[in-house]
Image (cartoon, coloured by chain):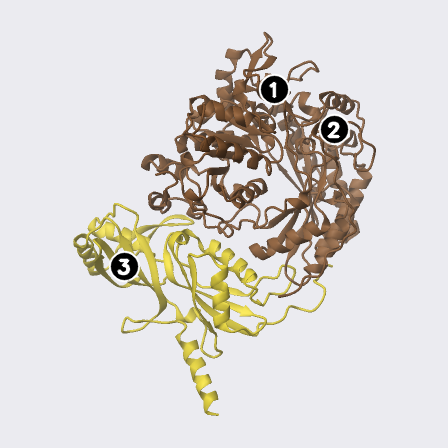
Chain colours: A brown, B yellow
């Protein structure tokens, strides 16, 4: 029988593995509907470990939106650790959902949220454990339709062989449309089989079905053309955009795990999209325009979420939270409302801006001031102009010093290494900056125990950004600059001991680069890596650079390309990029101009407070910026 | 100068409640940290007026007593909470029970009575019931006999610092074999010693003395905890609070 629980078969295995709690489900606010009650069954997967996947907002939102429909049922599944995977293979237990412990194979759809490309091998592992053919072409109408979503789905070509479709953009409404199509097709007796279902799905706004698009390549390895294999599919697939966030107050009932997770707090998304125009930032490019939740919308989500979860911390989430048009009031009024309740509020890492210190002070009014995080991203003023995240060195030092003077003892600074046009000097300026920050901070706070942590990672150029044409820095370049930086920081011990340096070596970034800007030919590499045991590539203890480079060296030469071709090669303006037929709304000409302006170190302003500079998104997608201020106030809570 | 929290210190503890709860079903796979997290959040959802510690990161006043191992079920887990306002223990029990997942049942809640001693002092022993699917009574009974007859049964125990040899025998005050629906059941009373001897260690000891190797993972349930007396009885650790309360109410009634 389909939809049957596998729990009795799974339970004996759970006694033999690490952290079994992550597989038993039953989290607060989890839902298990009767199988027969729904016409359409969705398995939603976050392709990483439970502790990373459970707090994911996207998955939580879709889980709730789908389960609110009486005709749909959604359950969650996560990547299983190798200890359990081995036992599942030995005992013939397939990939299961944690809610009803049902076989993923039994569902109509398997939705996979790719926040990062490093989850690709985990999708293959899950498909294999589920007993679903790895290649989309080998599936029949009894197999689930594998749907990719998340930011990485804006270039799904590397996984095009393994997924049936990809959803571009916001999923809230798209999952409903997909459900309708699947429901109708099933009710009609599955006419035309899987091919017909996929053809119908390809006509849903925002849904891309890779099998209906063929790639051909030129002698130099570049894409010669992308052609449709059916004329009833769109030439270009555009993204979905949810307007009016107050209408979509999800998650209303956030999931609360028993197991430990990476975020032990509740999150409320205070706005979606960002128009700051940081050129490295894919999220800021593909989620335009800015759509704010109103102060009252935020207030009611915080109130209801706390009631539903019992969490003691609320994160006010967005790509740049201090930019909410009423953030000052949001912070003040929430802090007033929850004063004395042992509820803490926080903002994620922020732009370097004195206002952010004021906000953080407000939110921690009566709480501990330990760590504050800023993200200057670039080490020198010059490179910050290139990436369009302009802040002067003086302002940066002043802001961080203000933080120390206000009682914050630890400041974390995020940087990237390997940015376009970067030289050793740009990176070495990070050390000078950190030294100055500590010097000034000690003076301003009168304390010796203040600390500054420099956290730095390799930059990976992403599709749909002005840097999509850029040559990625090699792992050697990154590693050598990080080495120089470490030496510079350690050169003066009296200051250096107050500075921490956290970094990742350049190797994983190279593979992320291959998967980010790769095309369909890269699918062969992913499959080979998985066949040779690769999974959990986001975890340093599981990631093997050698396995990836070897697989690339064995699979790519047949196509006349190699790993460097996909990563360290700069693209030309004329080149057809693997994602050109996928429309984020950004005008490719505008992106190219912005790339050229980056190279000449010219800045571009934010269209929320300066005139539109024609990035193309609003007219293409029929959307508009939605920002306040509304001038509204939160009412005091009535204590029950 | 380091910052200090503004305002008055948090209100003091005015009442202590002692709680017995069960972890059952799927939640036997919860660790003590998982349970602690679940309990703290449930107390907030149930709006129990907890007392908090002072300082910048106030913690609710909760004392956990030794938790059953991950993978074991229990009908007798104990926790003590400090409240900033007096509450009816039964109302707290019901509210907390409703706020916790189904597989965690809050069974009893009594007010700690001053002068009756600490809860930890009333617990030194666990009563275990271990189901051994796939094992018959005829296999288990002689194995238990052999184990009890031995003076020393050394087993390798996994600790933070690697494998360590532990004598499992002295911790076991009594043990017996039974059978239910064709499945052998091991009943035992085990002293809470350091390093801990857990059901797994006793099973390892049975494998060592009698080569008993269950084909399927055994299922252990802690049925009770308390103080072991000379007659081999394990006393209810909430008994003294209950007795003192009844006495007090009785005296009140006669006045």
Mark 1 sits on what residue?
Answer: A578
Circle 3 chain: B
Q: Quadrant of the N terminus of chain A?
A: top left
Q: Residue furthest front?
A: A188
Q: Position of residue A256 (x, y in %)?
A: 53, 51
Q: Find the distance from the CA under tag 3 to the CA under tag 2.
A: 78 Å
Task: Please report whichever mark, 1 or 2, sits nearer to the chain's N-terminal start.
Answer: 1
Locate residue A463, reporting x and y percent: 64, 25
Of helix, strand and loop, which one carries label 2? helix
Q: Is residue A613 left or right of residue A339?
A: right
Mark 1 → mark 3, Cα distance in angstroms = 68 Å
Res. A600 in view? yes
The subunit carrying tag 1 is A
Q: Which residue is mark 3?
A: B169
Q: Label 2: which residue? A: A619
Residue B221 picture quarter: bottom left
Q: What is the x, y in percent for residue A382?
A: 78, 29
Q: Is residue B187 above or below residue A401?
A: below
Give the camera-side residue of B101 and A20.
B101
Residue A335 falls in image quadrant: bottom right
Comparing labels 1 and 3, the label whose residue is closer to the camera: 1
Mark 1, secondary structure of its residue:
loop
Residue A442 visible at all = no
């Amino acid at each position: 029988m389909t939809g049957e629980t596998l729990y009795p078969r799974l339970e004996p295995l759970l006694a033999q593995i690490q952290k079994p709690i992550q597989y038993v489900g039953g989290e607060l606010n989890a839902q298990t509907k009767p199988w027969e009650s729904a016409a359409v069954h969705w398995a939603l997967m976050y392709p990483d470990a439970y502790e990373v996947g459970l707090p994911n907002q996207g998955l939580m939102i879709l889980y709730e939106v789908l389960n609110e429909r009486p005709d749909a049922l959604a359950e969650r599944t996560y990547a299983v650790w190798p200890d359990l995977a081995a036992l599942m293979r030995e005992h013939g237990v397939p990939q299961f959902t944690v809610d009803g412990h049902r076989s993923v194979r039994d569902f109509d759809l398997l939705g996979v949220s790719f926040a990062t490309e490093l989850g690709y091998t985990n999708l293959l592992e899950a498909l294999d454990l589920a007993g679903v053919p790895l290649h989309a072409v080998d599936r029949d109408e009894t197999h689930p339709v594998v749907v990719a979503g998340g930011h990485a789905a804006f270039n799904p070509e590397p996984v095009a062989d393994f997924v049936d479709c990809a959803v571009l953009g916001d999923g809230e409404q798209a999952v409903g449309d997909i459900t309708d199509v699947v429901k109708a097709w099933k009710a009609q007796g599955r006419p035309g089989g899987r091919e017909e279902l996929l053809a119908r799905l390809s006509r849903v706004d925002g849904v891309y079905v890779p099998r209906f698009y063929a790639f051909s390549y030129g002698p130099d390895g570049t894409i010669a053309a992308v052609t449709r294999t059916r004329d009833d599919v769109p030439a270009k697939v555009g993204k979905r955009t949810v307007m009016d966030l107050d209408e979509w107050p999800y998650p209303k009932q956030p999931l609360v795990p028993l197991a430990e997770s990476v975020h032990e707090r509740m999150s409320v998304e205070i706005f979606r999209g960002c128009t700051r125009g940081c050129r490295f930032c894919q999220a800021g490019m593909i989620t335009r325009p800015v759509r704010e939740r109103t102060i009252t919308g935020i207030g009611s989500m915080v109130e209801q979420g706390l009631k539903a979860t019992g969490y003691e911390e609320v994160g006010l989430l967005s790509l740049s939270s201090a930019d909410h048009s009423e953030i000052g009031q949001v912070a003040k009024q929430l802090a007033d409302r929850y004063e004395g309740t042992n509820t803490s509020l926080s903002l994620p890492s922020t732009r370097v801006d004195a206002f952010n210190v004021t906000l953080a002070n407000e939110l921690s009014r009566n709480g501990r001031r330990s760590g504050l995080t800023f993200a200057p991203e670039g080490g020198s003023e010059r490179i910050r102009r290139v990436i369009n995240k302009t802040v002067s060195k003086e302002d940066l030092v002043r802001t961080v010093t203000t933080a120390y003077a206000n009682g914050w003892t630890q400041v974390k600074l995020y940087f990237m290494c390997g940015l376009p046009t970067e030289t050793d000097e740009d990176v070495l300026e990070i050390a000078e900056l950190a030294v100055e920050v500590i010097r000034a901070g000690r003076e301003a706070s009168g304390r010796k125990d203040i600390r500054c942590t420099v956290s730095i990672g390799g930059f990976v150029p992403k599709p749909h950004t002005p840097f999509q044409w850029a040559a990625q820095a090699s792992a050697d370049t990154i590693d050598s600059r990080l080495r120089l930086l470490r030496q510079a920081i350690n050169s003066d011990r009296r200051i250096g001991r107050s500075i921490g340096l956290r970094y990742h070596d350049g190797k994983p970034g190279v593979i992320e680069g291959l998967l980010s800007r790769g095309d369909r030919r890269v699918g062969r590499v992913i499959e080979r890596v998985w066949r040779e045991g690769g999974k959990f590539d986001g975890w340093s203890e599981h990631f093997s650079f050698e396995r990836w480079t070897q697989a690339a060296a064995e699979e790519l030469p047949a196509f006349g390309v190699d790993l460097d071709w996909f990563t360290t090669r700069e693209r030309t303006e004329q080149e057809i990029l693997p994602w050109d037929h996928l429309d984020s709304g950004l005008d490719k000409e505008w992106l190219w101009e912005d790339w050229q302006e980056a190279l000449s170190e010219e800045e571009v302003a934010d269209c929320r407070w300066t005139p539109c500079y024609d990035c193309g998104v609003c007219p293409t997608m029929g959307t508009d910026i939605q920002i306040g201020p509304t001038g509204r106030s939160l009412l005091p809570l009535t204590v029950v | 100068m380091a910052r200090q929290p503004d305002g008055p210190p948090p209100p003091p503890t005015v009442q202590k409640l002692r709680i017995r709860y069960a972890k059952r079903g799927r939640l036997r796979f919860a660790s003590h940290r998982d349970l602690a997290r679940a309990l703290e959040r449930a107390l907030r959802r149930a709006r129990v007026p907890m007392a908090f510690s002072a300082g910048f990161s106030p913690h609710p006043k909760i004392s956990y007593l030794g938790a059953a191992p991950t993978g074991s079920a229990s009908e007798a887990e104990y926790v003590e909470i400090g409240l900033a306002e007096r509450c009816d223990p039964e109302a707290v029990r019901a509210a907390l029970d409703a706020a916790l997942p189904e597989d965690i049942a809050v069974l009893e809640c009594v007010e700690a009575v001053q002068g009756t001693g600490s809860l930890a002092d009333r617990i030194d022993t666990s009563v275990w019931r271990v189901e051994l699917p796939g094992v018959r009574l005829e296999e288990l009974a002689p194995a238990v006999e052999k184990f009890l007859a031995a003076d020393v049964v050394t087993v390798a125990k996994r600790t933070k610092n690697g494998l360590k040899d532990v004598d499992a025998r002295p911790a076991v005050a009594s043990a017996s074999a039974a059978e239910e629906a064709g499945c052998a059941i091991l009943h035992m009373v085990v002293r809470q010693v350091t390093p801990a001897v857990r059901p797994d260690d006793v099973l390892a000891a049975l494998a060592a003395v009698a080569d008993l190797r269950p084909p399927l993972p055994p299922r252990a349930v802690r049925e009770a905890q308390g103080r072991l007396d000379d007659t081999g009885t394990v006393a209810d650790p909430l008994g003294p609070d209950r007795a003192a309360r009844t006495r007090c109410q009785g005296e009140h009634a006669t006045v």
